[in-house]
Amino acid sequence: MSDLSSVARRAVEATTGAGATDAEAYVSRESGREVRVHGGEVESLTAATQTGVGVRAWAGHRVGYAYGTDLSDAGVAAIAGRAAEAAAVADEDEFAAPPAPAEIEAVPGLGDPSVAEWDTGRVAELALSVERTALESDPRLVGVEVAIYADAAERVAIASSAGVAGEYESSTCYAYLQALAEGDGARETGLGFGLARGPRGLDPEAIGAEGAQRALAMIGAGKPASRSCPVVLDETVAASFAGLIGGGLSAKAVQRGRSPFAGRLGEEVASSAFVLHDDGRDPQGPASAPFDGEGVPRRRTALIEDGRLRSYLYDTYTANREGTTSTGSAARQGYRSLPSVSTSNLMVAPGTHSLQQLLAEAEEGVYVTDVAGLHSGVNPVTGVFSVGASGRAIRDGQLAEPVREFTIAGELVAMLGAVSAAGAEPRWVPFGGSVSTPPLLIAGLAISGS
Amino acid sequence: MSELIDQAVAERALARALANGGRFAEVFAERRRGQTLAIDESRIESVQSGAEEGAGVRVVDGNTTYFAHVDGLDPAEIERAADEAAAALRAERREPRPLQARQVTPLPIEHRPEDIPAQRKAEMLRELDQRGRAEGAEIAQFTASYAEARRQVAVANSEGLFTGDDRTRVRIGAQAVARRDGTVETGAETLGAHRGFELLEDDPGQIAEQAAAKALTLLDAVPAPSGSMPVVVGGGFGGVLFHEMTGHGLEADHIQKNASVYVGNLGEQVAEPLLNAYDDGRLPGEWGSDAIDDEGQPTQMTQVIEDGRLISYLYDRLTAERDGVASTGNGRRESFRDLPIPRMTNTYIAPGDATPEGMIAEVDRGFYAVSFGGGQVDPATGDFVFGVSEGYLIENGKVTSPCRGATLIGNCLDALAAIDAVGDDFFMKTGICGKGGQKVPVGTGQGHVRVRAMTVGGTER
């Protein structure tokens, strides 16, 4: 048993010792680094270690939570005591109960040795190369606001008085840049990014080139005319919307009447071109793990297939409420948060269309490459949205002039019904959680521009 | 501050941070305590408390910052972080100046929230729940939350500064969902301050009624219009408009990277002469106020726009050094795990002389945005977007139907120049602002403001 598992066990014992009927402890230790570069120089270099424990205490059917960074015996005892006290303040909830232990199977490939093998100089060179590629791509590419490389290696252990016990290790890294282009008297920005388990999985030239190309493509952008028209969402935008849909499929949102998908299980909620799964075990998925935030095995869950709503996402509590089983969807933002229902890796199934074919099918419309204001422009209860957007006009089935300063508006479920085709090539995107999606063609959306 | 880190430990850590050279080193130590609880389905849940400690050490050399942070305040760990920050430097050892303790008076807290029993906080949430639900039978869902947070911080740097601050914030929020047949609408309201439990002694239940009233009003809403039109923005949270469209673009890091539309505009007329705007980290009790920033610099009131002319950017230590000016006390960080960067504190448009009724009366057809769900800007391009959480049509000089689903979009420089009336009413609201992955509490404020023309993106077909 490692030291993390032994901290978890110690915390569980201290919490039941403090009067809780049941207890669960989640311990994580993370070491990470971040390199930010600007103008061919390293702007900042960060090395970080974080270790902490989060304790969930049950007093019968009341639940409380406490977390902290002090893992000494006295520190853990204090956290345990606060968790037990917090439980006493909560109201009874008959469905609140500790998860039962289940067989946990390892997920291979979650760690990449290159995180440890590449020294700081080498990952700094990777970030510099991202920036350099963008700057050298075109004279109109006038700068890079920031180029960043970051990685983290994490070890997680969980234990509970019900007999849950598990531990795993994983690593993730990413690099991105925000490139600046100038032309036609205006400045444009472009994002390029890559995700991998370790630095050897990143392609700095491709990341730099993507940022440059996105910024350059926006030069000379004007407002499109207000109308309703076909829209192609690129992978980053499709991922943002998939994330909103994933939020609405949380059983917690559904049970509390705060989801446009409430009461629609088994019903038609999308066109057959839109197929959605949640997969917490995909070896490529940044959010993959052998078990979720409360020790329940991660798994693959069909959410939308053949246009029908197949399942919601459940943690133990929401599953108890409906007499069903958890889908392994209890997520945590580290040891500081109570587990709550959330997507793991959302996967929009690829179709058969190349991007050219999607554009050709759209004929006249807009290719949306960026959206802004998702946190304020979407009503998660009703699914009504109106968000800022930018991208390219589609004319005669081809990409035409850049467009910006417009909104796209509609309603999430209606939009899913209007998905007329999915692209053939999915991509991992860090927006909307962790999402793998191809570009999507929507038959009609309201655009508000000039 | 000495209870977080001993002067001798800080001095040793600074010496080790400069062991391989560097022109500046700093140790930032912090103790964070917090409690949150919520009510949902009329049940108290999500009762949580947190206790974290840690330290961050940075060394600056040339244009590069080296930073390491650790959990815990064990002196050996802090010194290890200092070694780690210094590890990549290759120059000659520098000696930090001896530390001189500088006392700071934290903002006054009358009733420490951690001394109030959690049951009393739960009772308050029950009251919010009852009052929110009592607003009408159409209130289908109601949730409310309570959060208190205390941050004790200490800053020691190689120039001899040794100071600290003790900050306590309390905030409550209410969210209501109203339902009538197939129509579902939401309303939200918050109340927060850099104060203790005294914030909640007046009548916290009001926000529950306000949130419920908003949701109920929206049940009668029509789809928002689309197109360019005059927009009157309400007071208080309307200030998020200025926060997004100007405040972020004035943060000196964006300026120095040529990633702001306000580059080169210092001293220029960017708005009508009726506009005056400030960032003020010293407003008593306000949500975005602190006694010092997270680099130990006293906070201050900084006028950024004077009679429509842009007169100052917002600086932290490093950006100020680069421009050869003094820091404006805007170096903030979310926690010891983050580097300080230029951030707003409380940002507002000062009251003008128009009346809200008067500026609305002059509009034939327009939009009245009372409050926003939030906003976002790309400072480099100036493109912004705001989600309107409560908005109305203006027809023939009168506020008429409520509208749902409206978003305001535009470009900063155009929209700022198009402000043609500023109201004499004024109040502040609380917000959480995200930048570079760091969230900090900010205040936004203004009276009613009218923008001559702005694009409203609605759902009307």
Image (cartoon, rainbow, N blue to C red):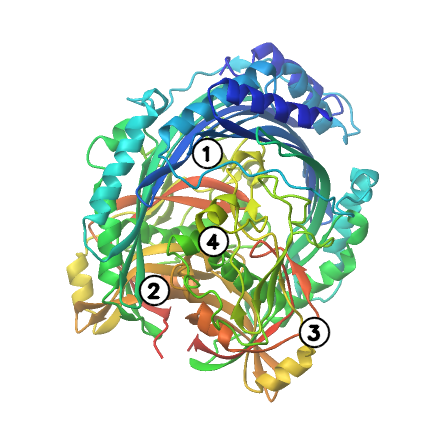
Residue pushed farthest bottom?
Answer: A396
**Front residue of this view, candidates A428 and B337:** A428
- Image-based side of A17 in relation to B362, left or right: right
| As drawn, A333 above or below B105 | below
Q: Which residue is mark 2?
A: B418
Classify residue B192 as left or right of residue A271. Answer: left
How far separated are the C-alphas under marks 1 and 3?
A: 51 Å
Q: Which chain letter goes with mark 3?
A: A
Q: Nearer the viewer, mark 2 or mark 3?
A: 3
Q: Residue B81, percent across and down?
A: 68, 24
Q: Which residue is label 1 attached to?
A: B329
- Residue A326's tag is none
Mark 3 neighbour class, 10 Å CA radius: few under 14, some 14 to 19, many 20 or more: some
Quick one: quadrant of the N terminus of chain A?
Answer: top right
The part of the image, by quadrant, that contains residue A434 is bottom right
Q: Report the amino acid beneath label 2.
A: Ala
Q: Amino acid at mark 1?
A: Gly
Classify mark 3: helix, strand or loop.
loop
Residue at the disc numbered 4: A251
Chain bearing tag 2 is: B
Q: Is residue B64 above or below residue A173?
A: above
Q: Circles 1 and 4: CB distance less than 8 Å? A: no
Local secondary structure at mark 4:
helix
Q: Mark 1 falls on what kind of element?
A: loop
